[in-house]
C-alpha cells in the first residue's frame, strides 16, 4: 500500500492539525513525486487505498479520488482550503517550504492529488 507522507515543516502547525483531524483532502505535488509517478505508471488508480502519514506517523487511510495537472497560476482558494490553508498565498508559502523556491512559482507545473478519508 502506498503511503502519502506530509511534513509539519511544509504544512505548518495549523494545516498539520487539520490533516490529523482528517480535514485535508488534497495535496499539491510535482510530477517527480512518488505518488504522481505511481499514478502515471498505472501503479495507483482512483479507488486505491493510501496510508496518510505526518512526519512518518500513520494517521489514517484514504482512497485516491483523482490526480490532475494544474499550472501554478491555476491554483485556487479551493485548492488552498482542501490542502488545509486559508488562502492561496498560504498554500504558495507551503510550496516554497517544500522546495519550490528556486524559480518563480508561476514556472512550476503541479498535480492536484485528491483523496477521501476511509477510516482512522
Image (cartoon, rainbow, N blue to C red):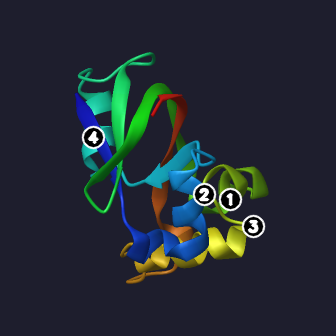
For label 3, the residue is: 86
Q: Residues within 10 Å of mark 4 (few under 14, many from 20)?
A: some
Numbered label attached to residue 54 = none
> Which part of the image, by quadrant, shows the N terminus?
top left
Q: Is residue 100 visible?
A: no
In percent of the image, x 38 and y 54: which residue is there?
A: 30
Mark 1 and mark 3 residues within 8 Å of each other at the beta carbon: yes
Numbered label attached to residue 80 = 1
Of callouts 4 and 1, which one flags the residue occurring earlier in the amino acid sequence? 4
Cα distance between the residues tagged 3 and 4: 25 Å
* Tally of marks: 4
The residue mark sitting in front, 4 or 2, is 2
For label 2, the residue is: 18
Q: Quadrant of residue 88?
A: bottom right
Cα distance between the residues tagged 4 and 1: 22 Å
In percent of the image, x 40 and y 77: which residue is there?
A: 9
Mark 4 and mark 2 residues within 8 Å of each other at the beta carbon: no
From the top left corner, tell me how far across and down residue 37 is, in percent: 26, 39
Of callouts 1 and 2, which one flags the residue occurring earlier in the amino acid sequence? 2
- Secondary structure under tag 1 reads helix
Cα distance between the residues tagged 3 and 2: 11 Å
Of callouts 1 and 3, which one flags the residue occurring earlier in the amino acid sequence? 1
Mark 1 and mark 2 residues within 8 Å of each other at the beta carbon: no
Judge from the rendering whether residue 110 lies leftward or rightward of residue 4; answer left or right. Answer: right
Amino acid at each position: 500500500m502506498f503511503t502519502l507522507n506530509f511534513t509539519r515543516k511544509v504544512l505548518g502547525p495549523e494545516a498539520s492539525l487539520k490533516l490529523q483531524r482528517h480535514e485535508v483532502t488534497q495535496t499539491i505535488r510535482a510530477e517527480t513525486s512518488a505518488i504522481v509517478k505511481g499514478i502515471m505508471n498505472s501503479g495507483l488508480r482512483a479507488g486505491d487505498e493510501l496510508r496518510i502519514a505526518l512526519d512518518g506517523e500513520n494517521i489514517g487511510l484514504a482512497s485516491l479520488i483523482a490526480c490532475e495537472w494544474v499550472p501554478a497560476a491555476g491554483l485556487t482558494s479551493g485548492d488552498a482550503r482542501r490542502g488545509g490553508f486559508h488562502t492561496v498565498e498560504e498554500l504558495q508559502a507551503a510550496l516554497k517550504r517544500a522546495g519550490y523556491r528556486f524559480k518563480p512559482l508561476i514556472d512550476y507545473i503541479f498535480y492536484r492529488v485528491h483523496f477521501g478519508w476511509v477510516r482512522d
